[in-house]
Image: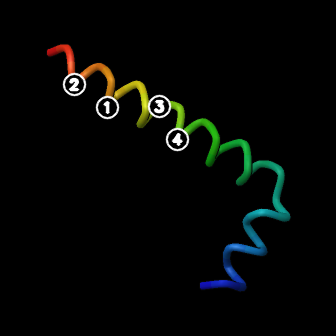
Amino acid sequence: METGARIRSNTTKASLDKQLLSAVSKQDLSASKYV
């Protein structure tokens, strides 16, 4: 798991995908609060 995290952090695309995912999930969480 630690190795996989290091590989992912070394991959720019994976890093951007992770940021996008966290941003989307944050929007989903805040949106579900107001629904």
Q: Residue at x 33, y 23 (%)?
A: 30
Q: Nearer the viewer, mark 2 or mark 3?
A: 2
State the SS at label 2: helix
Q: For mark 1, does the 10 Å Cα neighbourhood hold few (<14), some (14 to 19), or many (20 or more) residues?
A: few
Which circle marks residue 22 in the picture?
4
State the SS at label 4: helix
- Coordinates of residue 28 in the picture (x, y in percent): 33, 28
Which circle marks residue 24 in the picture?
3
- Coordinates of residue 5 in the picture (x, y in percent): 68, 73
State which tag comes first along the sequence, 4 or 1: 4
Q: Are marks 2 and 3 in contact (CB under 8 Å)?
A: no
Left or right position of 2 against 12: left
- The residue indicated by pointer 1 is 29
Q: Are marks 4 and 1 in contact (CB under 8 Å)?
A: no
State which tag comes first along the sequence, 1 or 3: 3
Q: Residue at x 62, y 48 (%)?
A: 18
Relative height, residue 33 to residue 8 (above, below): above
| CA gap, disc 4 and disc 1 | 10 Å
| CA gap, disc 1 and disc 2 | 5 Å
Amino acid identity at mark 4: Ser
Which circle marks residue 2 in the picture?
none
Amino acid identity at mark 3: Val
- Coordinates of residue 13 in the picture (x, y in percent): 77, 48
Which quarter of the picture shows residue 2?
A: bottom right
Q: In this orientation, which residue lies closer to the viewer: 27 or 13?
A: 27
Q: Which image quarter is the C terminus in?
A: top left
Which circle marks residue 32 in the picture?
2
